[in-house]
């Protein structure tokens, strides 16, 4: 186990573990790993903690996670353990306590019998064969089920299995999004299919809304088994759960099944979806999907499994709505009335977090009903996000507002498609005739913006006036910051001082230099499963990346806490510097409350000063100096920072604080200038859009007090008419009439 895991089971900080290693000669010696990342024997550590009267602080789920990581290679697989979770959940707490009290041999036999008794629930499960090597895992799992519940144990097991499969690419649909997709299904469908069920989030949401027959299929066995066990535990009594393993496009486990509704969050951008072998598949009623359009294959797979009039709701990437290769299929979906609505979500709603995904609502056409003549578009991509810890985009979506906007528009539209009234800037029903143009682009932002004439001129004028007032206030703040502190000349020549390298300062204890080393075993949230396993390592931790510093955002990366052992935690006063030198945006940031507690990303160096010897703002100012960064960089086309070569002046602390206050002032000026720039862009966008859309009219020329701005065309200076006479013509040029 790592030092970070020791800190968790002991309930202390990582710094305390480091102190134990230095101060106590009897602390267990490393049994593996490296000098920088040592590994310790779990039982030796537990014995040492017990000898000092230190009780374990790990939760049962944390103990299970640690035990799974340290189990022997020949130990039981996750599939068998998933079955044991289901069997254990069906026993009372007293029964689990009795099992835990059994000798090892009896416990193994009882666990085998219990798991075999529920083997028919999980798909394609081999016979259960627990051995004495599994005793520690069995006890940890039963304890977790007894004390924290079966869902906590399921989450830990799935997390571990997905970590072992580096190429799984699995992820979970967030619960609020799964609930939104399920609520978009009209009525209360009894039979629901998810052909790419993952961990079962969408089917769980459908079950919560009354679905009684739940069908799922997933290519990853661990996902299919977790879905089967999870739904069996959570679905209402009497619900019929059927989950199969396999590729739904290539090997459909339900070829003859038709259901009331389909929910699906399929894999994106898969060029190996079966294009060559499925050319003549009867599911392609709307056209054969191109190789790069796997999403259109999933759409038609969903429609093929619907009863006439049944609905499908899919979560898709935005490119599906506009790629030229899918134009003909989109046109046929629209022409037939199968495409009912497209709603754009804000970035951060689901993985990949930096892309605003889209929700497509489809309906299998009914032979006796005329095709629909309009399609609903809802755009929530620009919705403001709710406050989130550290400014992280993940989980920052205001789900209440997004859900209300999409659901309310869809509900009204579904009741009367032809009578739907546009909601300015949010929702609009577009006629089929208008959509069937040369590109057949069904991007919501494009279609909702086309309804600019529906915007209330008074509302737009109010927004423009408010934006202009904010801009004016920001400009005043910039002017105040720029004019409050005079910067005196140092003298005839520049000031000189003795300097020390960061390496020298670190050796002397004046600061620490920390960095996260990228490893293949650590995955970001975009590459791993959000298992939501609870405390002690199962939750996500925010990560500050180099891009966050450049963009001026809060921490937008994430990792599971269990994967973050060697990632330093940011504290207030840390100086954070990007590793790649150059590019746009700031190179450095001084950590404040917004960054505190986040983990350090792989592309960032962390400098932690001793406040009794180094002022943080003083250190920030000199470390972020362009000349300093250039002198400490190596490389040709791409410059990488060598942090030890950065230099810092050796000044008394009082003098450092003078400089630090000046650097703090300059950084505030920079931040306010960036805010003023953004407000200027927003104000210009509103006013320009209002002028071109007819909602705003320009003021009279006499009322405008334009500044004497100059624009150059060749060598001629073109001025506003009222100011031309006050500016002399260029020397040697005639003034043209």
Image: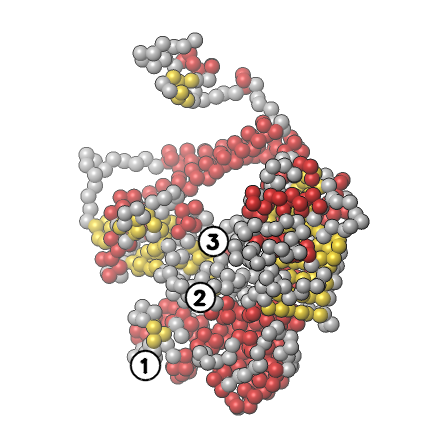
The answer to whether residue 661 shows anywhere in this view is: no
Residue 556's disc is 3
3D distance between C-alphas at marks 2 and 3: 17 Å
Q: Earlier in the sequence, mark 1 or mark 2?
A: 1
Q: Name the quadrant of the N terminus.
A: bottom left
Label 2 element class: helix
Residue at which label 2 appears? 563
Location of residue 523 by image quarter: bottom left
Furthest residue in direction right, as rendered: 368
Task: Please tell me whether residue 22 is drawn above or below residue 351 in the rendered image.
Answer: below
**Residue name at image x 62 percent, y 27 percent:** 694
Residue 364 in the image: state x and y as whole percent. 72, 52
**Residue name at image x 38 percent, y 79 percent:** 41
Residue at which label 1 appears? 26
Q: Name the quadrant of the C terminus.
A: top left
Q: Earlier in the sequence, mark 2 or mark 3?
A: 3
The answer to whether residue 662 shows anywhere in this view is: yes
């Amino acid at each position: 186990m790592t030092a970070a895991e020791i800190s968790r089971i002991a309930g202390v900080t990582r710094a305390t573990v480091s102190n134990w290693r230095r101060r106590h000669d009897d602390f267990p010696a490393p049994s593996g790993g490296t000098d920088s990342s040592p590994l310790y024997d779990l039982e030796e550590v537990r014995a040492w903690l017990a000898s000092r009267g230190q009780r374990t602080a790990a939760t049962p789920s944390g103990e299970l996670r640690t035990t799974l990581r340290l189990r022997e290679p020949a130990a039981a697989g996750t599939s068998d353990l998933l079955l044991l979770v289901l069997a254990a959940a069906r026993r009372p707490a007293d029964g689990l306590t009795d099992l835990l009290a059994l000798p090892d041999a009896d416990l193994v036999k009882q666990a085998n019998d219990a798991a075999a008794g529920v083997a028919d629930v999980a798909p394609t499960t081999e016979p259960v064969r627990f051995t004495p090597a599994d005793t520690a895992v069995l006890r940890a799992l039963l304890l977790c089920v007894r004390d924290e519940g079966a869902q906590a144990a399921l989450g830990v097991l799935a997390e571990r299995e997905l970590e072992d499969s580096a190429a799984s690419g699995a992820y979970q649909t967030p619960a609020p999004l799964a609930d939104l997709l399920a609520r978009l299904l009209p009525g209360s469908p009894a039979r629901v299919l998810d052909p790419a069920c993952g961990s079962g989030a969408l089917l769980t949401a459908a079950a919560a809304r009354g679905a009684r027959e739940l069908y799922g299929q997933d290519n990853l066995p661990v996902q299919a088994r977790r879905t089967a066990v999870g739904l069996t535990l959570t679905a209402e009594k009497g619900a019929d759960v059927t989950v199969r393993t396999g590729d739904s496009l290539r090997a459909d486990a339900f070829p003859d099944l038709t259901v009331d509704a389909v929910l699906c969050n399929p894999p994106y951008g898969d060029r190996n979806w079966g294009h060559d072998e499925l050319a003549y598949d009867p599911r392609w009623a709307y056209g054969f999907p191109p190789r790069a359009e796997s999403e259109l294959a999933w759409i038609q797979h969903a429609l093929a499994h619907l009863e006439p009039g049944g609905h499908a709701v899919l979560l898709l990437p935005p490119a599906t709505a506009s790629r030229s290769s899918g134009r003909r299929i989109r046109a046929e979906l629209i022409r037939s009335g199968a495409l009912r609505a497209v709603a754009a979500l804000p970035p951060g709603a689901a993985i990949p977090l930096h892309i605003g995904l889209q929700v497509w609502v489809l309906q299998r056409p009914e032979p006796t009903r005329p095709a629909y003549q309009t399609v609903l578009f809802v755009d929530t991509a620009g919705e403001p996000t709710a406050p989130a810890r550290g400014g992280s985009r993940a989980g920052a979506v205001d789900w209440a507002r997004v859900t209300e906007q999409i659901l309310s528009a869809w509900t009204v539209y579904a009741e009367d498609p032809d009578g739907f009234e546009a909601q300015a800037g949010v929702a609009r029903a577009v006629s089929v005739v208008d959509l069937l143009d040369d590109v057949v682009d069904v991007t919501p932002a494009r279609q909702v913006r086309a309804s600019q004439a529906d915007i209330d001129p008074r509302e737009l004028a109010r927004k423009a006036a408010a934006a202009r007032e904010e801009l004016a206030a920001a400009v005043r703040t910039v002017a105040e910051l720029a004019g409050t502190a005079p910067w005196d000349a140092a003298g005839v020549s520049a000031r000189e001082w003795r300097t020390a390298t960061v390496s020298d300062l670190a050796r002397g204890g004046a600061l620490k230099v920390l960095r996260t080393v990228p490893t293949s075993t650590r995955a970001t949230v975009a590459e791993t499963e959000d298992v939501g396993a609870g405390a002690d390592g199962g939750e996500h931790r925010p990560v500050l990346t180099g891009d966050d510093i450049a963009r001026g955002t809060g921490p937008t990366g994430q990792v599971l806490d269990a994967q973050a052992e060697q990632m330093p935690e940011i504290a207030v006063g840390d100086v954070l510097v990007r590793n790649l030198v150059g590019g746009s945006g700031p190179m450095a940031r001084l950590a404040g409350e917004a960054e505190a507690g986040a983990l350090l990303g792989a592309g960032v160096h962390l400098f932690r000063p001793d406040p009794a010897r180094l002022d943080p703002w003083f250190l920030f100012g000199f470390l972020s100096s362009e000349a300093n960064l250039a002198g400490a960089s190596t490389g040709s086309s791409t410059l990488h920072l060598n942090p030890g070569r950065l230099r810092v002046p050796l000044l008394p602390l009082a003098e450092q604080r003078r400089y630090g206050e000046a650097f703090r002032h300059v950084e505030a000026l920079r931040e306010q200038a960036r805010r003023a720039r953004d407000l200027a862009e927003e104000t210009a966008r509103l006013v320009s859009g209002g002028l071109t859309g007819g909602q705003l009219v320009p003021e009279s020329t006499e009322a405008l007090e334009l500044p004497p701005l100059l624009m150059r065309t060749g060598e001629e200076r073109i001025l506003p008419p009222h100011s031309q006479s006050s500016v002399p013509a260029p020397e040697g040029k005639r003034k043209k009439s």
